[in-house]
Amino acid sequence: MADPFQDVSAAGAAFIEAFTTQLEVRAAEPAMRAIVEAYLDDIDWSAVSLAVELGCGTGPIARAMAARCVAGRVLGTEPSVELLDHGRGLADGIGNLDLQVGDGSAVDLADGAADVVVFHTVLSHVPDPMVLLAEARRILRPGGTLVVCDGDFSKSSLASADNDPLNICARHFAENYVTDPHLTGRLGGLVKDAGFTQRAFRVTIRLVTDTPGMRAWVKLSGDDLVTGGNIGRPMADALLDEHDRRVEAGTLYGFQPFVTLVAERV
Ligand SMILES: C[S@@+](CC[C@H](N)C(=O)[O-])C[C@H]1O[C@@H](n2cnc3c(N)ncnc32)[C@H](O)[C@@H]1O
């Protein structure tokens, strides 16, 4: 099946509802906040007039950028009207943040208009990341900053033991809800080929033990396996119950490496 994040609006109400919540839950995790704050710390915000997040979803990263960008403004663009509508409610009252519907391959900005462009878990969900990197380069001024932060889904896991049944859901999610689970392994080369000079590359573990940050992986995977005739509904329900039991006990071991690459537009 095609990665539903390639066209969220076409993915159906259940998927949209799940990720309207899930993106906000993930952004609020202490581990994810630390990952985001670390790359926001890499930017000299006093020199930023315009920072852009492409593929902003409901906008948690764009809002964090706006809190830093006190001397300038932030633009978040997102192809899904549904995610963006929800994001507009959450951004209410943030005067230096604009949210616009749009694809990251054709941004409504002049060449060199932006000082900063951020992709947060977007490039692993597109068929050709070079198209979006080329557009980021076009809208960035020379010397401007590119940040790409993405999960290494090829190594994400829900396993706490050999043959842990919950891990089927992590594997299923990586195979069906991500376009390129190995994107982060190729990222350095892609960014270089797109015309950027790498300034930082770090890997940080997102560890989920007691929050529902990976619940959608289990819910959607269980539902898919039922639909595909692989398992019956009682087993899908049991997988979700087991996930929730571990979260309640603080014993879930949801493991996902996250790569952050910071680069300068040549
Ligand atoms: C996993 S979500 C991440 C959303 C947000 N950046 C965050 O971290 O909360 C992936 C996002 O990429 C968006 N997306 C998919 N294809 C895109 C494209 N061609 N241009 C811009 N965004 C795209 C999806 O609509 C979705 O909102």
Image (spheres, rainbow, N blue to C red):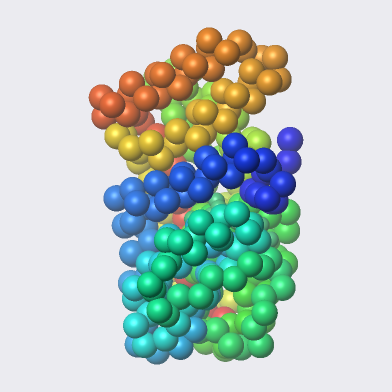
Residue plotted at (56% across, 55% down): 83
Q: Is residue 260 above or below residue 73?
A: above
Q: Position of residue 228 (x, y in %)?
A: 71, 20
Q: Position of residue 222 (x, y in %)?
A: 57, 23
Q: Position of residue 167 (x, y in %)?
A: 49, 25
Q: Can see residue 191?
A: no
- Number of numbered callouts drawn: 0
Q: Is residue 92 above or below residue 19?
A: below
Residue plotted at (72% across, 46% down): 10
Quadrant for residue 100, please give it. bottom right
Q: Is residue 262 above or below residue 72?
A: above
Residue plotted at (29% across, 34% down): 210
Q: Is residue 155 above or below residue 145?
A: above
User: Which quarter is ligand 1 in?
Assistant: bottom right
Q: In the visual, does 120 lie left or right of 135?
A: left
Quadrant for residue 89, please give it. bottom left
Q: In the visual, does 137 lie left or right of 239?
A: right
9 vs 212, nearest the viewer: 9
Residue plotted at (57% across, 13% down): 233
> In what quadrant of the picture does the C terminus appear?
bottom right
Q: Position of residue 134 (x, y in %)?
A: 69, 73
Q: Can see residue 76?
A: yes
> In what quadrant of the picture does the N terminus appear?
top right
